[in-house]
Amino acid sequence: MKPRDSFAFALVSLVLFGGAAATARAEASIALREAERVALGIDVAPVAQAATLRTPFSPGRIALPNDRVRVVALPTAGLVAAVEVAVGDRVAPGDVVARVESAELLGLQRAFVEALAERDLARSTHARERVLAEEGVIAGRRAHAARARREAAEALVEERRHALAIAGTDDETLRALSRTRRLQPSFSLRAPVAGVVLEQLARAGERLEAGAPVHRIGALDVLVVEAHVPVSVAEGLRAGDAFAIEAPAASGRIDAIGSDVHAADQGVLVRGRIDRGADRLRPGQFVRIAFEPAVRDGAVFAIPAAAVVHVGPRALVFRSRPDGFEAVSVDVRGASAAGAVVAGPLAPGDEVAVRGTASLEMLWLERAGTR
């Protein structure tokens, strides 16, 4: 045994068996003089009232919210002639991402051109019949019938115009087709939003059905983090509570808390939007996240983690008194390697032991008669 350890052991024995003054709270108090504190290596730290708790770190994953992801898909069946962008490329709204050749598109264009021809004929017929009816050459009902045919032809043109628009034909192409009546066997797929190409789902030369995805594009201006946390942790969280990501440092607030338990890990999904530090994160990245729920029931206090001593199911801290220390039972609400948040009969400004707690625990157990 080292000389210092021998001295500390002798000092503990002296406190236990020699001249410990009886007090009103002898079962919870440990009388120590200043020299004895120094010899046992006891240090103290102040207690501060905390506004939030802090959960242990949980694994999380960075993701994009649904409203920041767009899938570029084929509106009609066709052959992918060329893919113009790749994963990681940045695109602006309207940028061409792929070119497609489509026989189905040709059929829609032909139907549109035929409807235009029928509309033109119906218009000229109606104009002629109206003049003849006004001059009394023909009956008025013939002019009314011609007008009905003109209106039906115009409605057909609009129907087929909308069919082409649904098939991905833009307004400029529609105007050119109306003017030239020249069919185009190919069309361009364009980016609907500004963002980054997250995934390429088709290659040049593939023949795809209508609705087949070609690219997935994400706008990276907003990121979220998703984590599965134990039910006991989720019960203490609310939308709006803060969270912190360990590395790279980032933070934000909870958006949503799941209502069901995940079958694989028995965790509850918690999703939060990242407000600060999102520029250092990427979708799909795994991180460690701690939640900081607000205090909702009574006062809690922040103390160094080393101050908490566990004796069976009880958690204790040793509060400094002028004549020594007293053991105070606390309820640990949150803890990390650096600090703990506890509830109990403490007050801001109290000082608790953060070093030498093992010696204080032994003294307290002897005093309480549990050893």
Image: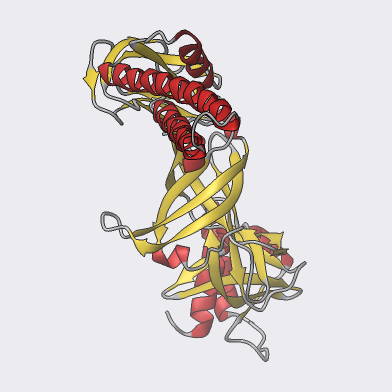
Q: Camera-side residue: 36 or 156? A: 156
Which of the 4 quarters of the picture holds residue 119? top left
Q: Position of residue 75 (x, y in %)?
A: 35, 27
Residue at the front extreme of this rendering: 137
Residue at 59% in and 82% down: 28
Q: In the picture shown, does residue 261 fall above or below 178?
A: below
Numbered circles on residues, count: 0
Q: Position of residue 169 (x, y in %)?
A: 44, 21
Residue at 49% in and 36% down: 139
Q: Camera-side residue: 157 or 90? A: 157
Which of the 4 quarters of the picture holds residue 245? top right
Is 170 left or right of 51, judged from the image as shown?
left
Q: In the picture shown, does residue 230 fall above or below 251?
A: below
Q: Quadrant of the N terminus?
A: bottom left
Q: In the picture shown, does residue 47 fall above or below 251?
A: below
Q: Camera-side residue: 324 or 175? A: 175
Residue at 33% in and 17% down: 110
Q: Camera-side residue: 270 or 36? A: 270
Q: Position of residue 178 (x, y in %)?
A: 48, 15
Residue at 74% in and 69% down: 350
Q: Is residue 229 visible?
A: yes
